């Protein structure tokens, strides 16, 4: 009976995380396709528009720091519910007032994302110890589904002057997910993330400091690189002057569609090669796509480059999270809070650097060198010898393995 409950809980919790990542994907990338619209509405230059990303990710960074404490005290589901609720509120009121209210709403839904995203990622890693990389790729596939749909929906809503209605529908969808998680049966149990003390976590970091620093850099660079590239594609396409506004707004969807396609292929590819090898091959492709965008002068070049970059980046983030769980085992939930803080700092800083560089040189091509450099640095970091990690037993969630007794249920 205990084994059955553990298997059932793992399956339901994983599916709940998958579903929650669809609206989370919409919310995460919403600012990118909305940027040309908001810039015109609020009369923003490149640097001021880039600061909107900073507002979102500054709030998200603070929330990530809180997420680990919430998970440890109340459980994964509580953090996911709170984060999704805040995201819904922020998106619902984004267009309901002046610029200051809009920036505040960006910060609110950014904070919600900062609470929910680490909780869902670490939950999936915990309850799927035997196939972390594959499960995390499917989780981020669901995120990509929302991210792909978002620019198309923004373009459609903008064409019919129904942007406020679109935001209301996204908020309503998010609230439906919140209610579904809240109504989850009480017998669903979560991994016990309180089994590792802070002092024990510090000792684990000191024992494996090189891996900690490498993973910290990867978390920082990945989210910043993805946001710096995906968040500015629509503005770059519009700046070329030979692409219609509607086509410009939809260009990020090709980037996120490639992310989604790559994540759907990754579980099969991981049966043929190691996760580290897949990440390295992907980063080479992503560098090629980002370099190609800088030489693009029309819609075809932009779309091909965006697709290559998205396909290359697709498996990197899930694999990085899986490496965190492999390296630090039972401490990964606590250490993950620090890693996700760094990822949010990168997510806010690098897109802002794109805006600053573009304003300084009066061209977005100068700014888009920033994510290209970030991609090249990640490839260099993945050249680290991960052999010990790849051969290490998946002990990070051993007590939640289906063959183990069920741990005490965390509060939901």
Image: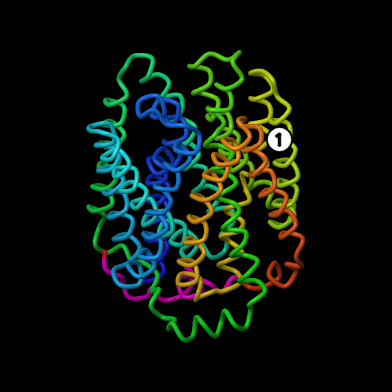
Q: Is residue 400 left or right of residue 91?
A: right
Answer above or below: position of 238 versus 182. Answer: above
Name the residue at 24% across, 37% down: 93
Q: Residue 369 lies in magenta, yes or no?
A: no
Q: Does the rendering let one see residue 146?
A: no
Give residue 402's position: percent from left, percent from top.
Answer: 47, 68
Pointer 1 residue: 289
Depth order, front residue of 220/368:
368
Q: Secondary structure at mark 1?
A: helix
Residue for point 59% across, 38% down? 229
Q: Position of residue 2 (x, y in %)?
A: 37, 71
In the image, taking residue 242 as reference, residue 107 lies left or right, namely: left
Q: Is residue 401 magenta?
A: yes
Tell me if residue 31 comes above or below residue 406 in the rendering.
above
- Residue ID at (40%, 73%): 193
How many numbered callouts? 1
Q: Main secondary structure of the magenta part?
A: loop
Q: Position of residue 16 (x, y in %)?
A: 37, 50
Highlighted magenta segment, given as a residue range = 394-411
Which quarter of the figure has residue 27? top left
Tell me if mark 1 has few (under 14), some (14-19) or many (20+) residues whose alpha carbon lies within 10 angstroms of its own. many
């Amino acid at each position: 009976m205990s084994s059955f409950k553990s298997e059932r809980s793992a399956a339901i919790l994983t599916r709940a995380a998958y579903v929650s990542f669809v609206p989370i994907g919409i919310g995460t990338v919403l600012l990118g396709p909305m940027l040309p619209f908001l810039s015109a509405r609020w009369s923003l230059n490149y640097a001021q528009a880039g600061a909107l990303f900073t507002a979102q990710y500054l709030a998200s960074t603070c929330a990530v720091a809180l997420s680990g404490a919430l998970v440890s005290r109340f459980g994964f589901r509580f953090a996911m519910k709170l984060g999704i609720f805040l995201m819904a509120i922020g998106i619902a009121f984004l267009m309901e007032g002046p610029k200051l209210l809009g920036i505040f709403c960006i910060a609110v839904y950014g904070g919600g994302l900062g609470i929910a995203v680490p909780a869902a990622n670490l939950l999936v890693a915990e309850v799927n110890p035997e196939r972390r990389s594959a499960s995390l790729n499917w989780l981020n596939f669901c995120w990509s589904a929302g991210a792909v749909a978002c620019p198309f929906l923004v373009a459609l809503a903008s064409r019919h002057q129904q942007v406020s209605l679109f935001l209301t529908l996204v908020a309503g969808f998010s609230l439906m997910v919140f209610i579904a998680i809240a109504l989850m049966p009480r017998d669903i149990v979560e991994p016990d993330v309180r089994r590792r003390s802070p002092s024990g976590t510090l000792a684990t970091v000191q024992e494996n400091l090189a891996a900690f620093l490498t993973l910290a850099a990867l978390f920082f660079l990945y989210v910043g690189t993805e946001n710096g590239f995906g968040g500015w594609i629509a503005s770059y396409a519009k700046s070329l002057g030979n692409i219609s506004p509607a086509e410009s707004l939809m260009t990020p969807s090709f980037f996120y569609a490639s992310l989604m396609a790559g994540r759907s292929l990754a579980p099969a590819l991981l049966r043929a090669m190691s996760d580290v090898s897949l990440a390295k091959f992907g980063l080479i492709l992503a560098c090629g796509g980002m370099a190609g965008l800088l030489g693009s002068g029309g819609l075809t070049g932009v779309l091909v480059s965006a697709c290559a970059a998205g396909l290359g980046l697709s498996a990197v983030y899930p694999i990085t999270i899986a490496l965190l769980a492999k390296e630090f085992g039972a401490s990964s939930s606590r250490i993950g809070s620090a890693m996700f803080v760094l990822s949010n700092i990168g997510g806010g800083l690098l897109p802002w650097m794109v805006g600053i560089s573009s304003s300084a040189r009066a061209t977005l091509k100068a700014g888009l060198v920033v994510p290209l450099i970030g991609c090249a640095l990640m490839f260099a970091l993945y050249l680290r010898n991960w052999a010990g990690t790849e051969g290490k037993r998946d002990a990070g969630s051993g007590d939640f393995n289906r063959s183990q007794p069920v741990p005490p249920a965390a509060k939901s």
